[in-house]
Amino acid sequence: MPTIPLLICDDSNMARKQLLRALPTDWDVSVTLATNGKEGIDAIRQGLASVVLLDLTMPEMDGYQVLAAIQAEQLQTKVIVISGDVQTEAVRRVMAMGALAFLKKPVEPLELKTLLVDLGILVESKSAVAIVPPSAIPATSFQDAFREVINIAMGRAAALLARVLGVFVHLPLPNVNMLEVGELHMALADAQAGEELTAVCQGYIGGGIAGEALLIFHRSEIADMAKLMQRDSVDYSDMEMLLDLSTILIGACLTGIAEQIDVVFSQGHPQILGAQGGIEELIRVNQRRWKKTLAVELSYSIEGHNIHFDLLLLFTEDSVDRLTKKLAYVMS
């Protein structure tokens, strides 16, 4: 049997390395790596991908756009989507666009091998896998590794929100940065952009890792959220509605992170902050603890509705060392 050209298309260095480790060792393939959808579709056009392992949330071109281009150009390739976006609607859409299967991240080696056999793609060979070995990929940085953890966690949170509200949630590319407290002020000022904000704040701690979660809403969109959540009682206030929404998103995202790094987070009682004053006060109170913070920014939007909200996860500087140790294996 000839060597099969395989394309791994994912913007995360960590995810690409994980997939290389998950490939069956008796599968005779040559691997091309793409870091975004544009690179991926170029590789497919060049005949470097009779099989594609495709991520969905990527810069340049996302996975949906790659699938659309494959259909439009009638390119001959077999696509398996491997994504952290596990919404039922996401799976339905990619299958309708020609994907042969969907696997959630992080994929298990046995799960991948079983699927490849079931699809008739894997024919066992005595040849070793002719791939780019994981050791040949540059070492994964902490930010890249943690960004992939966040990517998986936010996908699980979006799936829960989508199921509860009956919507499709557009997932962002997560931003992960170390920020000085002054830079954090600026980031929150940019998020406000002249509009009044309401935020829900919730602390969390576990396994030597601690921080605050901020779910930030534009007040102009609260009425739209009330309609979406089918508020039918005058006793169900805006504040109660926002607390319910934050419980879903913050809780699911923290659980998704905790499961991947093998810790258990205890969450504090959520608090409603006012507009700018409340957020400023939160930073002032935590200024010493947040002299430098690991900040994760996620900007969700809901399809078909004028609803956007930002989720900020602010980890203390002391938490970074513990997180780095938790991610040491995948970073190596």
Image (cartoon, grey):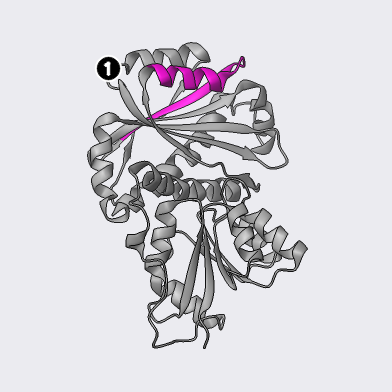
Does residue 124 lie above or below 144 as drawn? below
In the displayed orientation, state which residue is furthest to the right: 72
Q: Residue at x 50, y 16 (%)?
A: 274
Picture mark count: 1
Seen at 54% across and 25% down, the residue is 239
Residue 268 seen anywhere in this rendered image of the structure: no
Up the image or down, 24 lies above or below 235; here it is below
Q: Quadrant of the C terminus?
A: bottom left
The image quarter containing residue 302 is: top right
Please state the horizontal and vertical placement of residue 201, each as a whole percent of the image: 43, 26
Residue 19 found in image quarter? bottom left
Up/down of 294 relative to 101, above or below: above
Which residue does the image show at 34% across and 27% down from the upper left?
A: 293
Q: Position of residue 80 (x, y in %)?
A: 57, 68
Left or right: 308, with 319 as reference point: right
Residue 188 belongs to magenta span: yes
The x, y position of residue 98, in whole percent, is 68, 68
State the residue position of label 1. 288
Q: Amino acid at mark 1?
A: Arg
Front in this rendered view, residue 326 or 253: 326
The crowding category of the residue bearing disc 1, from other C-alpha atoms within 10 Å (few below 14, some 14 to 19, many at least 20), is: few
Residue 132, image x, y percentages: 41, 66
Outermost residue to the front: 46
Residue 147 within the magenta-colored segment of the rendering: no
State the SS at label 1: loop
Report the front residue among 33 and 120: 33
Image: magenta residue range: 182-204
Instruction: Report if residue 188 is visible in the image.
Output: yes
Front position in the image: 256 or 242: 256
